[in-house]
Image (cartoon, helix red, strand yellow):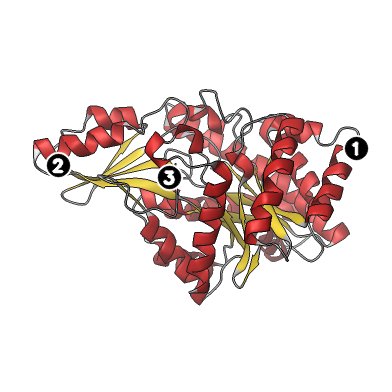
């Protein structure tokens, strides 16, 4: 829905189902009810997530036309998409395979290009459209610095091929589309500084000559194209896990002319670990309830000297829970954004409040997408009906942005 500071929506990776028929059926059942509650008199956006399978199926027969007609009938529109998870995302063991296939592969390029072709046909006139995507690859898959560097170079070249396609769409139709890279713990790009370093020293360094040669333009013109079509997806949960300074990162990006394509409004788990073994055990026992087998739940812990320890998953952190040097954990588990106090553990809701305040004071994007996809694996004490959850989250954001 349109608010004073952008277009606010939710990501449909919340829904189970990888086929287009299944996904569309859930949308037809749930979206009109959500819209009726939140935006009964105005159109409302959808943050569409299509698996690779669904992205192929929606282009078959008249499925895309049918979807466009349905959107018009119910007062919906699509302006952002989630192109991070390629395959199954619910009721299956996802873990590190959420990064597969990564940006070193033709499969990732083909999937992302297909999503952009779909979005170009769905996007309302006069709006820009973005697709969030993985942070190139997953660090633990590569055992040497040489392997990692080779993979990063291949991934960057593949992203440049997508930029070329987006430029041609822009030139021929005027439609502005951007690829929004989403840093995540243990991804090739997992922090603001890593993203900026890659953008300047890999994407721009290689991309200016690539675009200049391919498009027969100057390198200054090429830089403008790269900054137009490659942006950052600011997932608040992911940045909060790394204890990152939101104000400093956003100001640095603005100063460098690097755009934020979308804010993914999401909250992580956090917990202060008491020095008392008895009290610490109570907290870690509570955290263990979030240790489930579907998704990666990376943990970044802070030591007494403020240095960090990185654990690839919650189970590894729990195994080191008696470490007396550790004072705080932050875990990659998307919890409801409208709750900060979860009992013995908390959420990083204050990080969301800070980022939204920055957006209000000096807007840096017009795409705002709530992304809490873990409703199916939340501890039972936090579960509420799905439509009610979506409505509460969007209403909470709207209230924050209106106050």
Q: Residue furthest right?
A: 61
In front of the other: 287 or 236: 287
Contact flag, marks 1 and 2 (Cβ < 8 Å): no
Residue depicted at 50% across the width and 33% down the height = 376
Measured in 3D between alpha carbons, the distance from the residue under mark 3 to the one under mark 1, in whole angstroms, is 37 Å
| Location of residue 109 in the rendering, given as x and y in whole percent from the top left corner | 70, 37
| Location of residue 399 in the rendering, given as x and y in whole percent from the top left corner | 50, 67
Q: Nearer the viewer, mark 1 or mark 2?
A: 1
Give whichever of discs 1 and 2 has the lower sequence position: 1
Residue depicted at 59% across the width and 70% down the height = 5
Mark 2 element type: loop
Mark sitting on residue 62? 1
Q: Which residue is mark 3?
A: 335
In front of the other: 215 or 359: 359
In front of the other: 37 or 174: 37
Taking 383 as reference, is 228 above or below it? below
Mark sitting on residue 5? none
In front of the other: 36 or 126: 36
């Amino acid at each position: 829905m349109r608010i004073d500071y952008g277009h606010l929506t939710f990501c449909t990776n919340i829904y189970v189902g990888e086929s287009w028929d299944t996904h569309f059926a859930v949308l037809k059942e749930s979206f009109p009810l959500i819209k009726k509650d939140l935006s009964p008199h105005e159109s409302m956006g959808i943050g569409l997530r299509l698996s690779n399978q669904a992205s192929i199926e929606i282009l078959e027969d008249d499925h895309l036309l049918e979807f466009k007609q349905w959107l018009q009938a119910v007062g919906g529109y699509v302006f952002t998409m989630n192109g991070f998870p390629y395959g199954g995302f619910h009721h299956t063991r996802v873990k590190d395979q959420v990064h597969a296939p990564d940006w070193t592969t033709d499969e990732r390029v083909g999937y992302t290009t297909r999503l952009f072709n779909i979005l170009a046909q769905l996007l309302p006139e006069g709006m820009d459209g973005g697709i969030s995507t993985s942070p190139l690859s997953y660090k633990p898959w590569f055992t040497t610095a040489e392997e990692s560097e080779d993979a990063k170079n291949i991934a960057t070249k593949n992203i440049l091929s997508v930029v070329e396609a987006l430029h041609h769409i822009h030139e021929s139709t005027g439609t502005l589309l951007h690829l929004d890279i989403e840093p995540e713990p243990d991804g090739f790009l997992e922090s603001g500084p890593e993203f900026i370093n890659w953008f300047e020293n890999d994407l721009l360094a290689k991309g200016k000559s690539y675009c200049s040669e391919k498009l027969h333009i100057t390198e200054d013109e090429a830089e403008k194209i790269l900054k137009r079509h490659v942006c950052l997806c600011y997932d608040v949960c992911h940045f909060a896990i790394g204890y990152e300074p939101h104000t400093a990162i956003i100001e640095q990006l603005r100063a460098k002319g690097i755009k934020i394509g979308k804010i993914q409004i999401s909250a992580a788990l956090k917990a202060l670990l008491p020095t008392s073994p008895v009290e610490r055990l109570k907290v870690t026992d509570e955290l263990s309830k979030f240790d489930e087998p579907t998704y990666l739940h990376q943990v970044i812990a802070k030591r007494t000297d403020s240095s960090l320890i990185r654990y690839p998953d919650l189970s590894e952190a729990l195994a080191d829970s008696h470490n007396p040097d550790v004072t705080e954990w932050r875990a990659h588990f998307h919890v409801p954004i409208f709750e900060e106090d979860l009992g013995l553990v908390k959420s990083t809701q204050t990080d969301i409040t800070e980022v939204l305040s920055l957006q209000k004071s000096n807007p840096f994007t017009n795409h705002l997408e709530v992304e809490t996809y873990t409703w199916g694996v939340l501890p039972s004490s936090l579960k509420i009906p799905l439509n009610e959850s979506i409505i509460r989250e969007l209403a909470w954001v709207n209230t924050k942005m209106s106050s």
